[in-house]
Image (cartoon, grey):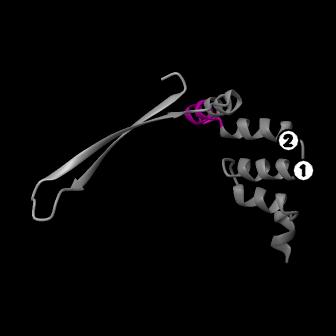
């Protein structure tokens, strides 16, 4: 609707005491919707990833584009969710080696 959001509402209002009929008030609200093109582009990209199930490559692209170590770690942990042997890879991300833990 050209950046407009239209919503409708029906409100039941009780009429005078003793009257059995209820009246309905109908309201129409028109709101201006501000859209951020960058946000919409990222949303579309994520929808495509979900449809193609390309989660690992998406996370890897985010890791490569990360500007901080924290952001890189977040995407690395998310990526592990979609990989084989996620338990072992979580341990590696936390600084442990799977082989060393077996010896203890």
Q: Nearer the viewer, residue 28 or 62?
A: 28
The residue positioned farthest toward the top in the image shown:
2
Q: Is residue 26 above or below residue 99?
A: above
Disc ID at residue 66: 2
Q: Is residue 30 above or below residue 9?
A: above
- Is residue 53 in the magenta section? yes
Q: Quadrant of the C terminus?
A: bottom right
For the record, the magenta segment spans 46-54
> Which residue is at a point 78% across and 35% down the rendered structure image?
61
> Which residue is at a point 86% across and 53% down the rendered structure image?
70
Give x and y (percent) for residue 28. 37, 37
**Separation of disc 2 and disc 1 at Cα?**
7 Å
Give x and y (percent) for residue 42. 68, 32
Badge 2 vs badge 1, beta-carbon distance below 8 Å: yes
Q: Nearer the viewer, residue 87 or 59?
A: 59
- Is residue 86 in the magenta section? no
Residue at image mark 1: 69
Give x and y (percent) for residue 91. 80, 62
The residue positioned farthest toward the bottom in the image shown:
104
């Amino acid at each position: 609707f050209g950046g407009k959001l239209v919503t409708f509402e029906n409100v039941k209002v009780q009429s005078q005491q003793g009257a059995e009929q209820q009246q309905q008030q109908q309201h129409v609200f028109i709101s201006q919707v501000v859209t951020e093109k960058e946000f919409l582009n990222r949303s579309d990209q994520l929808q495509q990833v979900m449809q193609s199930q390309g989660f690992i490559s998406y996370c890897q692209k985010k890791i490569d584009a990360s500007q901080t170590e924290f952001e890189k770690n977040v995407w690395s942990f998310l990526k592990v969710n979609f990989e084989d042997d996620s338990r072992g890879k979580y341990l590696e991300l936390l600084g442990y080696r799977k082989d060393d833990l077996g010896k203890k």
